[in-house]
Image (tube, rainbow, N blue to C red):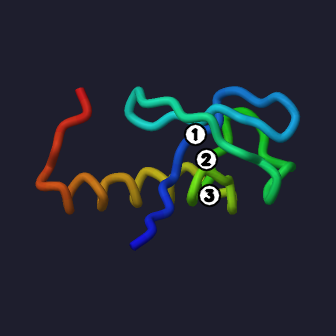
Amino acid sequence: MCLAVPMKLIEKKGKIGVAEISGVKREVRLDFFPEAEIGDYIIIHAGFAIQKLDEKDAEETLLLFKEMLGGVDDE
């Protein structure tokens, strides 16, 4: 099973970016979505940015993930 996760792009250097969610940072590839800009919420799948997501939709999706995990607090 694969899961795509919305993350916020916080760094970008060419086709490599760093995305963050709940304090966890991951290096991501931007080959499929080179127009991603710092501050964008992007959907990450298998280490690649595949789509931009507006902030409201990203927050709703992350809330659903949190609910599925039994309300795990990220603090």
**Residue 37 occupies quadrant:** top right
Judge by depth and name the residue closer to the eye, 73 or 49: 49
Secondary structure beneath disc 2? strand
In the rendered view, would you say 59 is above or below 61?
above
Determine the residue located farthest toward the bottom in the rendered image: 1
Q: CA distance from mark 1 to mark 3?
A: 9 Å
Query: Which residue in the structure is indicated by mark 3?
Result: 53
Query: Which residue in the structure is indicated by mark 2?
Result: 41
Which sits earlier in the primary sequence, circle 1 or circle 2? 1
Q: Is residue 52 left or right of residue 46?
A: right
Answer whether labels 1 and 2 touch (C-beta < 8 Å). Answer: yes
How packed mark 2 is, by other alpha carbons closer than 10 Å (few <14, some 14-19, many 20 or more), is many
Q: CA distance from mark 3 to mark 2?
A: 5 Å
In the rendered view, would you say 58 is above or below 12?
below
Secondary structure beneath disc 1? strand
Question: Which amino acid type corresponds to the residue marked 3 in the rendered image?
Answer: Leu
Q: Is residue 73 left or right of residue 43?
A: left
Question: Which amino acid type corresponds to the residue marked 2 in the rendered image?
Answer: Tyr
Secondary structure beneath disc 3? strand
Q: CA distance from mark 1 to mark 2?
A: 4 Å
Query: Which residue in the structure is indicated by mark 1?
Result: 8
Q: Residue at x 11, y 55 (%)?
A: 70
Residue 11 in the image: state x and y as whole percent. 70, 27
In the rendered view, would you say 65 is above or below 34?
below
Q: Residue at x 83, y 28 (%)?
A: 13
Answer whether labels 3 and 2 touch (C-beta < 8 Å). Answer: yes
Answer whether labels 1 and 3 touch (C-beta < 8 Å). Answer: no
